[in-house]
């Protein structure tokens, strides 16, 4: 084999190697990433054990946020049945958290939230039930988690009642990466998959 043929062979060998390396890279390491939808704004709420919590206490954890109220007889029991399945999957993982916000702070006091958490077997380490002012709770739902139209904030807060079945997935950097229907099994299954993806990032 002459030098020219050898150079061509080496050249095409390098190209072939780069091609396969690219295939491996893009199909394995560079999967389609979850989009960044929004950024969670600073918040401060009271947890069901009476502790004040904020973004500082999250400590770079992946978390799922939802809104509910303890006296709900409609979608909330279905949502939290599915949320409990998520909780059980990750209850031993210190990098994961669930934050359940009440939409009815006037009635969902700390003792009420504590009893509700106990009824679900939720431990404080991985599942928080939080309350605060109605204004701050609804503002966070709309402007951070995108669980309602932000334009609704212009309505008199006393006349509002936020009732949503959606869950929001947030990454370690406090960015919203997905919104899921909390009463649809297929979307909850997708949420579990996406949680794993964020935990692996």
Image (cartoon, rainbow, N blue to C red):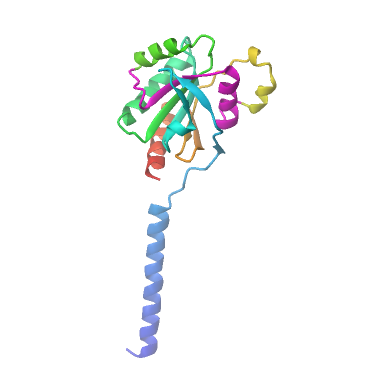
Farthest residue, direction bottom: 2
Task: Where is residue 185? Give x, y as percent.
Answer: 41, 27
Residue 23 placement: quadrant: bottom left
Q: Nearer the viewer, residue 34 or 101?
A: 101
Task: Where is residue 122? Give x, y as percent.
Answer: 35, 20
Q: Residue at x 35, y 25 (%)?
A: 85
The N terminus appears in which quarter of the rendering?
Answer: bottom left
Residue 184 seen by the camera: no
Q: Residue at x 36, y 36 (%)?
A: 95
Q: Is residue 46 above or below residue 108?
A: below
Task: Where is residue 167? Give x, y as percent.
Answer: 48, 28
In this rendering, position of residue 161 left or right of residue 191: right
Q: Residue at x 40, y 82 (%)?
A: 8
User: Bounds of the magenta span?
Assistant: 121-148
Q: Is residue 79 above or below residue 5?
A: above
Residue 105 seen by the camera: yes
Indicate yes or no whether the magenta region holds residue 142.
yes
Residue 38 placement: quadrant: top right
Q: Nearer the viewer, residue 194 or 129?
A: 129
Q: Residue at x 45, y 13 (%)?
A: 110
């Amino acid at each position: 084999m002459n030098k020219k043929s050898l150079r061509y062979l080496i050249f095409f060998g390098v190209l072939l190697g780069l091609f396969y390396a690219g295939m491996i890279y893009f199909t394995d390491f560079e999967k389609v990433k979850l989009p960044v939808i929004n950024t969670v704004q600073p918040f401060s709420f009271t947890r069901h054990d009476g502790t004040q919590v904020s973004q500082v206490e999250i400590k770079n954890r992946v978390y799922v946020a939802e809104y509910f109220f303890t006296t709900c007889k409609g979608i909330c029991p279905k949502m939290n049945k599915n949320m409990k399945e998520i909780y059980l999957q990750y209850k031993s993982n210190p990098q994961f958290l669930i934050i359940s916000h009440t939409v009815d702070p006037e009635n969902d006091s700390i003792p009420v939230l504590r009893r509700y958490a106990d009824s679900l077997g939720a431990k404080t380490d991985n599942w928080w039930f939080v309350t605060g002012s109605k204004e701050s709770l609804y503002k966070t739902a709309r402007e951070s988690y995108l669980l309602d139209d932000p334009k609704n904030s212009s309505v008199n807060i006393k006349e509002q009642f936020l009732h949503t079945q959606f869950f929001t997935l947030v990454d370690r950097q406090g960015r919203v990466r997905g919104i899921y229907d909390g009463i649809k099994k297929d979307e909850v299954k997708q949420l579990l998959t996406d949680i794993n993806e964020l935990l692996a990032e």
